[in-house]
C-alpha cells in the first residue's frame, strides 16, 4: 500500500513489515475492534482496516495522526484517530465516537479484539523520552524498555476474551522481559516472528555506546527483530 510519509513521521520500515506479516496470519472477523498504538503513518492501522476491522489509531504526534488520517482518506478506508500517550485517549466502550478528552474512568474495561504496536524501543543515553522531534518514534531510555514496560502493564486489560496483542521490538530491548511480563498479566504469549537485520542509521550511530554499556558485542552491527504475540483466554 502506497502511503504518504512527510518529514518527521516515522516511515514503515523492516519492523513494520515484520509486524504486517504477523498481522496477515491472524484470523480476524470483519468487524473486529482494533487499536493501533503509535500509528506513525498508519501502515498497520490501514492494513487492519482493509481487512474490515474497526480501527482506532493513537499517536503522540499530531503530524503522524494527520498523516494516518490522510492516508486512510486516500485509500478510502475508515479510520478513527486519537491524540495521546499510549492507551490514555481511548474511546469509551459505549461511545466509540467519544472526544479526545475522554479518559477511562475507575473500573472501566475496554475490549479490543486486536491491539497492534510498533513502539519506540531503541536504547538511548537519554534517561527519559525526547520532549519533541522525530526521535520520539524510536528513543526508549537506556535499556529500550521505557514504553515496552508500560505497554505490558496497560494493554492486557484492554483485550477481549480471545483478543490478541501483536508487538514488535528489537532484541536489544530484551524480548524475554516482554514475554515474562505479558505472561504474568495473564496472556498466553509466544514469539510469532523473528528476523535478523543490519543496523540502520540511528543504531549505527549508537553502536559504540551499545558496546560500552554491554548491549552488543564489539563489532556487532545487526539486531534481531521480534514480534511478540499475546492472547487473552
Image (cartoon, helix red, strand yellow):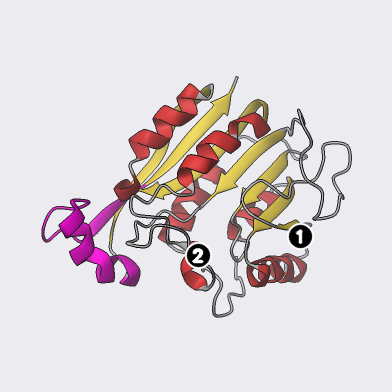
Comparing 1 with 123, the one in front is: 123
Picture coordinates of residue 101, whole percent (x, y):
81, 54
Which picture quadrant has residue 58? bottom right
Compared to residue 32, the image places residue 67 above or below, namely: below
Name the residue: 60% across, 70% down. 2
In the image, the segment drawn in magenta is 201-225
Comparing 138 with 232, the one in front is: 138
Q: Nearer the viewer, mark 1 or mark 2?
A: 2
Q: Is residue 26 visible?
A: no
Residue 231 colored in magenta in the image: no
Q: What distance separates the C-alpha of mark 1 from that of mark 2? A: 27 Å
Q: Which mark is residue 136?
A: 2
Q: Considering the image in quadrants, where does the C terminus appear? A: top right
Compared to residue 112, the image places residue 172 above or below, namely: below
Position of residue 202 in the picture relative to residue 97 (left or right):
left
Q: Which residue is mark 1?
A: 77
Q: Considering the image in quadrants, where does the N terminus appear? A: bottom right
Q: Is residue 76 visible?
A: yes
Question: Which element type, helix, strand or loop, lies under badge 1?
Answer: loop
Amino acid at each position: 500500500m502506497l502511503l504518504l510519509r512527510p518529514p518527521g513521521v516515522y516511515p514503515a520500515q523492516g519492523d513494520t513489515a515484520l509486524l504486517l506479516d504477523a498481522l496477515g496470519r491472524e484470523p480476524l472477523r470483519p468487524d473486529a475492534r482494533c487499536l493501533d498504538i503509535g500509528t506513525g503513518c498508519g501502515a498497520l492501522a490501514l492494513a487492519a482496516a482493509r481487512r474490515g476491522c474497526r480501527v482506532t489509531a493513537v499517536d503522540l504526534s499530531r503530524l503522524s495522526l494527520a498523516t494516518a488520517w490522510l492516508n486512510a482518506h486516500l485509500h478510502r478506508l475508515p479510520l478513527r484517530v486519537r491524540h495521546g500517550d499510549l492507551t490514555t485517549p481511548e474511546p469509551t466502550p459505549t461511545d466509540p465516537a467519544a472526544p479526545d478528552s475522554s479518559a477511562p474512568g475507575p473500573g472501566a474495561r475496554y475490549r479490543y479484539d486486536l491491539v497492534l504496536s510498533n513502539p519506540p524501543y531503541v536504547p538511548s543515553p537519554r534517561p527519559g523520552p525526547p520532549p519533541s522531534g522525530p526521535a520520539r518514534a524510536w528513543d526508549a531510555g537506556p535499556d529500550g524498555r521505557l514504553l515496552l514496560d508500560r505497554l505490558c502493564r496497560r494493554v492486557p486489560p484492554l483485550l477481549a476474551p480471545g483478543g490478541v496483542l501483536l508487538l514488535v521490538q528489537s532484541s536489544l530491548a530484551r524480548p524475554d522481559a516482554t514475554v515474562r511480563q505479558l505472561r504474568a498479566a495473564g496472556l498466553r504469549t509466544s514469539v510469532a516472528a523473528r528476523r535478523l537485520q543490519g543496523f540502520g542509521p540511528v543504531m549505527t550511530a549508537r553502536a559504540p555506546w551499545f558496546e560500552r554499556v554491554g548491549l552488543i558485542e564489539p563489532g556487532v552491527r545487526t539486531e534481531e527483530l521480534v514480534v511478540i504475540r499475546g492472547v487473552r483466554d
